Image: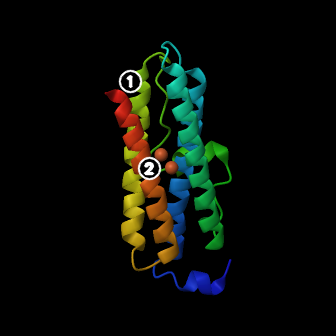
Amino acid sequence: MGEKGRQIVGLDVEELLADLNRLYADEWLAAYAYNYMSQVVTGRPAAKQLAALLLDTSKDELEHQQELADRITSLGGKPVADISKLVEASNDGYPTPPANEKDFDAIVRAVIKAEHDAIEGYNKLAQKTHGKDPITYELAVHILTEEVEHEDEFENLLG
Ligand SMILES: [Fe+2]
Ligand SMILES: [Fe+2]
């Protein structure tokens, strides 16, 4: 961790690390849930298409956790180490997949709810870091842009 890089952050770094770690946990949980739903979704010809979109989106969330981990470690923090603590460490909890894997709309709605939570989380992070921590700000805007795209892609499936 660069001392100067940490010094120029015009925010409480420990508080910022806590914010980043909650988002980190959210990303792992979303990646897991989307990946899981991509594996079990069934029941219509379009299931393959939904499964592919879920898997692609899951990969985006995995990229987000990696980007957050990079920022956390560069600020001298550590990402959440204990997988059994991920849910309590998160902002939004686990986006529980619907019990019925044939219920497309319920699956899509579960994703959209998680994306809404992500959009709120990154928008807050962008506002908090604006003018204070350009590196985290840029990261927040980058991820926020992709979460907005995710919301859009899944909303389009509801028709
Ligand atoms: Fe994400
Ligand atoms: Fe997303």
98 to the left or right of 58: left
Give the image location of residue 51, x and y in percent.
55, 27
The disc labelled 1 sits on which kind of residue?
Asp
Image position of 131 with respect to 82: above or below: below
Give the image location of residue 50, x and y in percent.
50, 27
The answer to whether any part of residue 76 appears in the image is no
In the rendered structure, find residue 105 and report the number of the disc placed on it.
1
Give the image location of residue 149, x and y in percent.
42, 47
32 to the left or right of 96: right
User: How many discs mark residues in the rendered view?
Assistant: 2
In the rendered structure, find residue 97 and report the number of the disc placed on it.
none
Residue linked to disc 2: 147
Tag 2's secondary structure? helix
Looking at the image, which is closer to me, 85 or 103?
103
Looking at the image, which is closer to me, 144 or 8?
144
Image position of 78 with respect to 82: above or below: below
- Which residue is outermost to the top? 43
